[in-house]
Amino acid sequence: MASRRRAGLGMEEAMTEEDSQTVPSRPVTTMVVSAACGLVFGFAIEKGKVYEPAVVKNQMLLVQFVMMKMFLSGVISGMFVMSIMSMLPFTRHQYLGAKSIFVKSLRGKGFMTASVGGVLLGAGMAAAGSCPGVILAQLGSGTENSMYTLLGALFGTVLYGILEPVVTELTKPKQAIRFQFLYNVYGSPYFAMALPFAAVLSLIVFTLELVYPWEDEVQIADSVYQSSSWITSPAWPPFLSGFVVGSLQVPVVLFIGDTLGASSSFCTITSQVFLHKSTKRLSPYLLKYQSGFQNWWQVVFVLSSVFGAFMSSIFSGTYGSVPGVSITQSFVGGALIIFGARLAGGCTSGHGLSGMGLLNLLSITTISAMFLGGVATARILQWLN
């Protein structure tokens, strides 16, 4: 039985490695799909209200569950569509290739890096009321002080890029992780475990919605709320927004050959500062992100999310109406968010939507640590205030 399990795992890993060599050969198509997905992502994030700093902070204080319902809904829909893609003969190739790229992005990461990075990510989220996937959506929606969160995030990226050799040496695992995915532990196919997990998470979302109805949690003036159109409505149910975001895994996997993520885009953007020969030695880590559409598609994605959030807030009449946190919390929180995300190897999109959707053990560890760090930091900040 054990030998059969090892053989099954070896076959899947071999297929994954083979598929990792497959890269989409149409960069124009890749960038168009990236832009379209970013537009939808930003629109759904704004409608789901998880870009509002108060919503993120209240989630970490465990007094409001809009963010949790949307996040879990995104994981659920991602699990479902990726399960389908893993089973269909004409999409399995792309699924395995995207999964392989995800695993490669975690090379050199271990449970310590995932835990420490997750705690820092959560602390930054509690401080700034943001995360890598929504920083630019906050900018597009006119959220107060969101520019300082962005500046902090860029600073955190450069700081991590310079300190990466030291940080890696201190936190790298002594030996390679034996099992990357939860279903590997039991020797089962991905979909055989992902679909039951999705069902359990659906029950959790349903229960949260029963106890904390989203209409009661989202504070919108009655005069603004009156809208018969989904486009002009100031808010969508969090489970609908999450479903839309999670479903974006389909075009990203099939046309880009990757999975949803956001924090790597900050590495690509800041790496342009190190183009001169005199600065290249400062961060060999960031140099890896300077070129190639495998890196730039995420930049196109997050920049398009700015316009998506802008369009949504304009259509609903909510642009510039969301209060932010202080400049100090915005900047420091933004720096912690990206530093933690790069240390862990992913953010709420990469580790959360994609990694948890794939049942990756490092991702599950990172997101668990993220909530622990976020809850602890939110309580400390509440006490200080």
Image (cartoon, grey):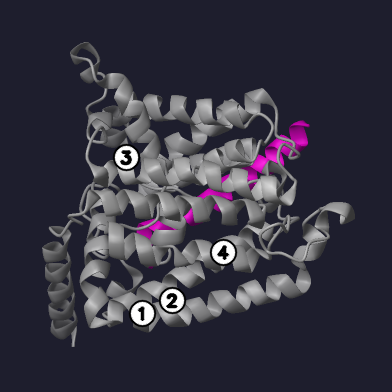
Q: Which residue lies furthest to the top in this view?
A: 278
The picture quadrant where one finds residue 232 is bottom right
Looking at the image, do the residues carrying marks 4 and 3 touch, with CB atoms under 8 Å apart? no
Q: Which residue is drawn at 21% across and 11% down?
A: 278
Residue flagged by tag 3: what amino acid is it? Thr
User: Which residue is disc 1 drawn over?
Assistant: 84
- Within the magenta stretch, is there residue 255? no
Kind of element beneath mark 1: helix
Looking at the image, do the residues carrying marks 1 and 2 touch, with CB atoms under 8 Å apart? yes
Residue flagged by tag 4: what amino acid is it? Gly
First of labels 1, 4 by sequence position: 1
Q: Where is residue 98 in the image (x, y as percent from the top left)?
A: 27, 61
User: Which residue is disc 3 drawn over?
Assistant: 171
In the figure, 294 relative to 320: above or below? below
Q: Position of residue 27 (x, y in %)?
A: 24, 49
In the figure, 302 relative to 47: above or below? above
| Crowd band around label 1 with a 10 angstrom C-alpha radius: few (<14), some (14–19), many (20+) | some
Residue flagged by tag 2: what amino acid is it? Phe
First of labels 2, 4 by sequence position: 2
- Within the magenta stretch, is there residue 367? yes
User: Which residue is disc 4 drawn over?
Assistant: 242
Q: Which residue lies furthest to the bottom in this view?
A: 1
Q: 150 or 126, which is in the foreground?
A: 150
Residue flagged by tag 1: what amino acid is it? Ile
Q: Give the range drawn in magenta.
A: 359-385
Most frequent secondary structure within the magenta stretch: helix
Measured in 3D between alpha carbons, the distance from the residue under mark 2 to the one under mark 3, in whole angstroms, is: 34 Å
Q: Is residue 54 left or right of residue 86?
A: right
First of labels 4, 3 by sequence position: 3
